Amino acid sequence: MIDYIPRSHAYYSAQGYKPYQWASFAEVPFTTPAKPLAHSRVVLLTTAAPVRPEAGDQGPGAAYNADAKFFEVFTQALQPVPDLRISHIGYDRKHCQAKDPNTWLPVAELQRAAADNVIGELADELIGIPTNRSQRVTLEQDAPAALRECQRLQADVALLVPT
């Protein structure tokens, strides 16, 4: 067994970095929805990445592919359902082949939830959120950009489906 946290601290300390500060929040920046979910406009937020052919293999079962990462919040129409992949994410590739995009991009299920009046409606676009591992960039750049997109899309509820 490898002690990840002590090993990471030692590695970055040896390179002259300050000790890592784990993310924590005294106040959680969430709120209770103003109206029932059945009357709410829901926007899908995802950490999945648009396919970039020049970035190498991004298909099901692909090895970790840092070249497929993205670094800015993006939006994309939900129709047709976009081709987003997760090869840039660290996940258990031994037990997961990543063959079913519905596990990280449940567009059909959310459309079904809207048709069944579980949610009021689904926004026409999704919002892509980078996974660049920087608390500062997330707080100062990505979160405000995602909030602006949620507001532009007139979302009442944002559903984050991380990968």
Image: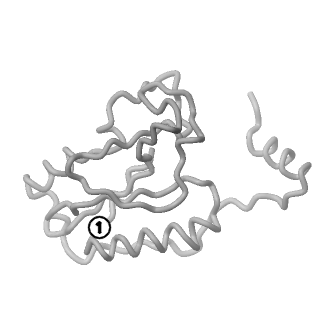
Residue at point 54%, 47% (across, down) = 69
Pointer 1: residues within 10 angstroms few (<14), some, or many (20+)? many
Position of residue 117 in the picture relative to residue 101 (left or right)? left
Q: Quadrant of the N terminus?
A: top right
Please name the residue that numbered disc 1 is placed on. Answer: 157
Q: Position of residue 76 (x, y in %)?
A: 32, 57
Question: Horizontal placement of 76 versus 62: left or right?
Answer: left
At label 1, which amino acid type do we have? Val
Q: Residue at x 20, y 45 (%)?
A: 109
The reply, left or right, for residue 78 in relation to residue 148 is left
Dividing the picture into quadrants, the one containing residue 65 is: top right
Would you place residue 47 above or below residue 73 in this image?
above
Q: Nearer the viewer, residue 65 or 94?
A: 65
- Count of labels shown? 1
Which residue occupies the extreme top position in the image? 94
Residue found at x 41% / y 56%: 128
